[in-house]
Amino acid sequence: MLARTQNKPAFTMIELLAVAALVGILASISVLRYSKMGSQTVLTNQTRQLYLIAKYARIAAIEKQTVVALKLDEAGQLLYLEAAMQNQEDQILSAVNSQEEIPAGQMESPILKNAYTRPLALDKKLLVEQFLVDGMDGRQAQSLFYPDGKAQACLIQLGDGLHHAHVMVSQTGRVTMQNGIAEQLLTGRVDLDSQE
């Protein structure tokens, strides 16, 4: 006599395929979110490095008693510091006071590199969207820090098209960092830090 087979409860093939498709969709959504979060993290890290470079530029100008420039290379992918030699300082200060552009070869000096700062090579996905220096009308991509602790006011905005962050330097040398598009432009604004 043949034994009767009992119907045991089990999942059908259609139910298994539906669950596999649902897991695949959820995995692809999480990968997309993770990749977007990664670009935001890169932007935040590089903006923080730029912030620290700008803070160190002020400290280096005071310590070395010379003019230190925060510069952007011509390709727009490298931000670095240069310190003026003593014999160049008067020429640079007179050019700044008359609001003239400093010629490219005027600050012939080594790039500052030490344990506290090194040139910032931007990620390939990031761009310097704005480099505004107060009183220069976009003619040069550099901001100067002076031995008395003051600086040329500047705004440097980094972005990747979707996310934006900026570093702002006031005339008193105060450096701030914020996420988002820069709302305040440098021209026509009053720096309350410098008024006594």
Image (spheres, grey):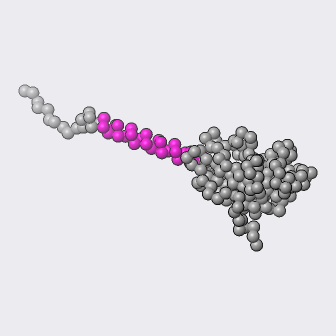
**Residue 70's x, y, as percent?**
76, 50
**Residue 101's x, y, as percent?**
81, 49
Magenta stretch in the rendered image: 17-42
Q: Is residue 61 left or right of residue 130?
A: right
Q: Quadrant of residue 176?
A: bottom right
Seen as rendered, the residue at the extreme bottom is 196
Seen as rendered, the residue at the extreme top is 1
Front in this rendered view, residue 144 or 19: 144
Task: Check the picture and name the quadrant holding the N terminus.
Answer: top left
Which residue lies at the image location 47% right of the left edge and 42% below the top edge?
Answer: 32
Q: Is residue 196 left or right of residue 46?
A: right
Front in this rendered view, residue 28 or 140: 140
Which residue lies at the image location 71% right of the left edge and 39% below the top edge?
Answer: 75
Front in this rendered view, residue 183 or 72: 183
**Residue 161's x, y, as percent?**
57, 45
Which residue lies at the image location 69% right of the left edge and 63% below the top edge?
Answer: 189
Is 3 inside the magenta-drawn segment? no
What is the count of numbered marks? 0
| In this view, 25 is above or below 63 | above
Is 24 inside the magenta-drawn segment? yes
Seen as rendered, the residue at the extreme right is 87
Predominant secondary structure, magenta span:
helix
